[in-house]
Structures are given as structure tokens and as C-alpha cells.
Amino acid sequence: MHNFPVPYPNELIYSTVARASIYHGITSPKQLLDEIFNNRKVIATLDLPCHLQSLSEQLKNTGRFSLEELIYRHTMFPLYAPFVTELHRVRAMQLMAGRSQGAVHLLLGVAASRVKTDNRLRYCSECLKVQSQQYGETFWQRNWFFPGLNLCPEHGALHLFAVGTTEQRHQFHALNVKIPNLMNDVPINSDLMHLAKYARQLIAMEPEYSPSFSQWTTFYHDLALDLRLCRGKHIKHDDVYSRISDAFHHKTFEQLRLQINPSRDSCWLKSIFRKHRKAFSYLEHALVWRALIPDLSTKEIVALVCKIKPNNKFFCSTTEQQKVNNQDLLRKRQLWQQAVLEVGVTAARKFGKGKALYAWLYRNDRTWLLQFNAEYHQRKPNPQLKSDWHKRDLILVRRLLRWFRASEIDYSVPRLSANYLLSQLKNKSTVEKNLNKLPLVHTFLQRYSETITEYQLRRLSNACIQAYRETSQLKSWVILRQAGLSKERLTADSKRVLAELRLFS
Ligand SMILES: [Zn+2]
């Protein structure tokens, strides 16, 4: 789609797509999907949408909105990222680039979480005033959609619509306050407002390497130690419970549906202070942080966890490798992941900075590097483009036409055989094998590849022009020699044309 709207700060991608439908006057949901994604099966997802690579490409001209920026600034992904393992974080981003079919929600634990996502659309009337003043229009803002918290972290109460996004799976609704809606009936208390602040800080965080489960385990264990909530190695769960329940109004847990039953061994509060085996939701973490370390911001807490000496297989293990500064290592891993996400492993290894990064990681962090690359290979980053032959056909034929136009004036190029034309493409052999699926490329080759006669005539014309310029006369043997041809090698058609020109008899 031309002129895909530029997302506003903090605007959900869902909302930008909905605005695109208004700008272009497209009322049919399927037509909208066709125009934007070239795919009619895209599902309108509020929190963790997919097909973001194609949107990033449509926004290329802005010089912004890389895949990572779209994910971190315009989806709810940062609410989950620090709490899942690094492998899951990267895999989820890959899925969000292309097709996911629900896998992102499974991977980030949304589907199994105790905190349920409410898909009803909602807005904050105070925020709307600010939007109208600043931008002259309104849009769905990320911080109205924190799972489990139906409130605006700045102003509190929200207006909820009866419709959710699940009723019409392919429809992107633009924000329209004229549709009947109701004020949020959930009483907003200061507990909820405090928790929302953690969520607001999380969605503003920069893309970062996720701590491992073992780092989270150590963090909570050390926290209990510091606050004397331990007896020897053992956590005093009853004491933890009383600290947490004292910090909040008793109805808060009920409202969040995160009730704590201290007599049950499987209650979430006990689990978060034990060995982490799966991700906890941001709200569970935030409840503990608010009660036990209220002065620390989300960013400070995550930074603390990242600093804990990692103890898992993804970190280097030999003494040699342990000398490497961890921060430096994490930064380099991040840069490598970005490069791979953008261009793939093979290409990333070839270009300047990627080459050096690869060499460095190979020396210092081989286990992680090989594992990451293997993972990446297993998950094709953009399966849709891989199988979308029509789209490929269009891209390839455009590339060929561009090359052809640029080299048309150059009469000295070798014979434009189909083989030579195809060798102008990077992935020549794949194209060659799949020509039956690429009708446009096939037609291009038929139309523009040169026969031997055409090639001979091109060389002869060049020689004629040159000879005439130099000597003002045309002698057949001079022309043949300059064209690198002999009478014997001329095709019958070439001979006929030359005879008509009375150059040869
Ligand atoms: Zn607001």
C-alpha cells in the first residue's frame, strides 16, 4: 500500500492499520488485508500482531520503524520480553515478523497465564483530549491495554466498548467514540495505579537481552535473603505472604484474579520465590516489587537481574571465556541478533561489521552463537515470502528490468542469453529451478534474451559504426575482424541482413 500511515508515539499497530482503512476509504476488511499485507488471512490482533516485516518495509521511506522498533514501540511485546528466556524472546520476534498462527501467544505464555487478556476495545477520555490537541486525530494507545488492569496509568478510569476484537477476526476497528460505550465499572484504587506504573515503564524499555530463569531465581532468592525472609537456604513463605498482603488492599488480589492461598503449595507467590521453570506475568512480578522494593524502577530491577552471574548453558563456560566482560558479551549478542533478524545468518556473516562480530562471538561465545544460528535456521524468518511466488516473481522481474534499462546503452555486453540475464540475480539457481512458478521472469527472459543472430548483428553494427567513424568506409574484412567474427561463423539470417545492406555478397 502506498502512503501507509506513520504510527504515532505509543500507538498500537492495530490502530495504525485501522487508520489506514479510513485514510484510503476501504470499508471491506478483506480488501484492506489484501492492500496492506497481500494476505487475506491476517487476524486483527491488538496485543501481539504478526506480519510486521511487511509493515516495516512499507514504512522504509521514513528512515525509521525497523522491525524491532515496531515490536518494542507499537505492540505489547515489552510487557513479556524480560520475563521469557532469550531464545523465546528472539523466536517470538521472528514469528511477529512473519506468520504466527497463535504461536507468539503460546511462546510468551499469554495463553496459559493467570492474568487474562481482555480484548474489549477501550479509551481514556483525558488521553483523547491530548491526542486531538497534539495530532488532530485519535488512535488506540498502548497504555490502555495492560492485561489484567483496565485503567489508564495517567488518568485512571477507561471507557470500555461492548465489542472486542475477537468477534470479527479480520476487522480493524478505528477509534470512534460515537459507538456506545460505558465507563469502566472496576473501582480504580491507588494499588492498581501503582502497578500500572510498572507496566508503563516496561513498555518504554529499550530492546534488551532477556535474563535467564536462573537469574530470576537467584534474584528472588537474594531478595528474600536481604530482607531476612529466609531461614538458612529456605524461604519463609509465610513471612513473604504477610509482607505482600500488608502492602495491598485485600480486594486488589481479587480484582487482579491473583489471589494468594498461603496453604496451597502451588500458589504463585511461593513459586516465584522458588526455582523458575516458566515465565511469570508482569503483574505477578510487579506485586512483589511494589511490596518489597518499592523504590526501584522496572529498569533498575531488570538491570540488577541481568548483572547476576548467569548460570546456564547459553553463557560461556570455560575459564578463558569467563574473562570476557558480560556486558560486552550481551551487547555483541544483541548486535548479532539484530543483524541476523535483518538479513539472515549467511548475509550477516559476509558484510563488514557482521563479519567481525561473527569472528568475535565464535572465539568468545561459540556455544551460544552456534545454538542461536541453528535455531534461526530452523525457523525461517519470513516463511510467507518464501512461499509467496507471486510476490517473488514481481520483485525479481523488477530487479531484472532495472538492470536491463541501466545496461541497454552499453552495446559491448556479452550475449544476453537467458543464462546471462539470470546471472544478474543473487539467487540464480533457485530462480532457474522454479521458473515454472515465476511467469513474469519467464516472459522477461523470452522477450529480452538475444539469439545468436541478434548478438552477431549487434557486434557487426558496433564494428560498422567504429569503422565508419575512423575511416569513413566499410570494408567487409575489417568489420568482421573488429566484430570478432568470420564468414563461416555467420548465421544464415546474419548473412541475409548483411547482403541486404550490400556489405557482403
Ligand atoms: Zn489517560
Image (cartoon, grey):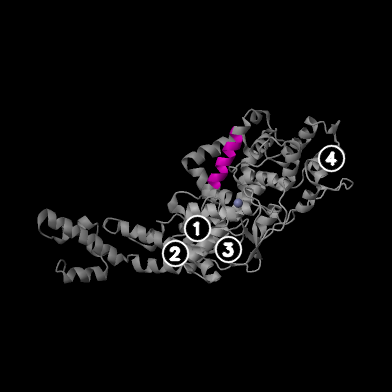
Residue topped by disc 2: 394
Label 4: how many residues lie within 10 Å, few (<14), some (14-19) or many (20+)? few
Type of amino acid at the residue the image marks with label 3? Val
Q: Amino acid at mark 4?
A: Ser
Q: Position of residue 18 (x, y in %)?
A: 54, 63
Q: Looking at the image, is 432 positioned above or below residue 360?
A: below
Start-end of magenta stretch: 328-340
For mark 2, give the secondary structure: helix
Residue 137 x, y percent position in the rendering: 50, 58
Report the residue marked by disc 1.
137
Q: Earlier in the sequence, mark 3 or mark 1?
A: 1
Q: Nearer the viewer, mark 4 or mark 2?
A: 4
Question: Image check: 44 left or right of 264?
Answer: left
Residue at disc 4, CB closer than 8 Å to ligand 1: no
- Above or below — where is 311 with respect to 173? above
Q: CA distance from mark 2 to mark 3?
A: 41 Å
Give the mark nearest the N terminus, 1 or 2.
1
Q: Earlier in the sequence, mark 2 or mark 3?
A: 3
Mark 2: amino acid? Leu
* Horizontal and vertical percent position of residue 264: 88, 48
- The numbered disc on residue 3 is none
First of labels 4, 2 by sequence position? 4
Task: Say which residue appears at 47% left-offset and 61% top-offset.
Answer: 431
The number of callouts visible is: 4
The circle on residue 242 is 4
Q: Which residue is mark 3?
A: 177
Judged by depth in the image, the label closer to the viewer, 1 or 2, is 1
Secondary structure state at the residue bearing disc 1:
loop
Q: Are marks 1 and 2 in contact (CB under 8 Å)?
A: no
Question: For residue 105, which quarter of the picture?
Answer: bottom right
